[in-house]
Amino acid sequence: MSQFDMGPMGALLGGFQAKIEAAKKRASETEVTGEAAGGLVKITMTCDYNVHRIEISDAAYEDKDMLEDLIRAAANEALRQARAETAKGIQDLAGGLPIPPGLLGGMGF
């Protein structure tokens, strides 16, 4: 047996890879919605950061500067929610072990 034979570790890593792929799929299917000014602007995106919908109330069109601020606020809220959902999924995946930033690049970290 080679000193580099990973044996059961290889199977463990393969199972972990499958869990990562499942988490990525879940992120691509989970939607969050950020709102600003009581719903004048709503942005819906998936947890893999793809924007699916932007809704703007007619009342928000009256002031261009305000509308830009509301879009920015709604986008930031949606991003915050997506990051929080992703972090929960990563914690579940890792079983509470600390995951270094950037280790799971495709997961938004």
Image (cartoon, rainbow, N blue to C red):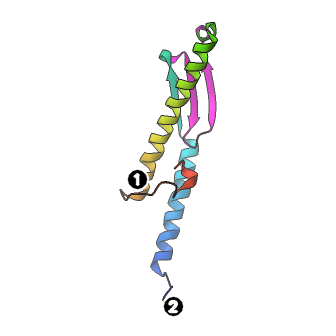
Give the distance between the C-alpha atoms of the residues marked 1 and 2, in whole angstroms: 34 Å
Residue shown at 45% from the left, 52% from the top: 90
**Position in image of residue 108 (x %, y %):** 54, 47
The tag earlier along the polypeptide, 1 or 2, is 2
Q: Which residue is mark 1?
A: 92
**Position in image of residue 94 (x %, y %):** 41, 58
Three-letter residue code for mark 1:
Asp
| Mark 1 surroundings: few (<14), some (14-19) or many (≥20) residues within 10 A | few
Three-letter residue code for mark 2:
Ser
The reply to whether discs 1 and 2 touch (Cβ–Cβ < 8 Å) is no
Residue extending furthest toward the front: 65
| Mark 2 surroundings: few (<14), some (14-19) or many (≥20) residues within 10 A | few
In the foreground, 57 or 103: 103
Helix, strand or loop at label 2? It is: loop
Magenta region, residue range: 39-59
In the foreground, 33 or 74: 74
Helix, strand or loop at label 1? It is: helix
Residue extending furthest toward the bottom: 1
Which numbered disc covers residue 2? 2
Residue shown at 56% from the left, 23% from the top: 42
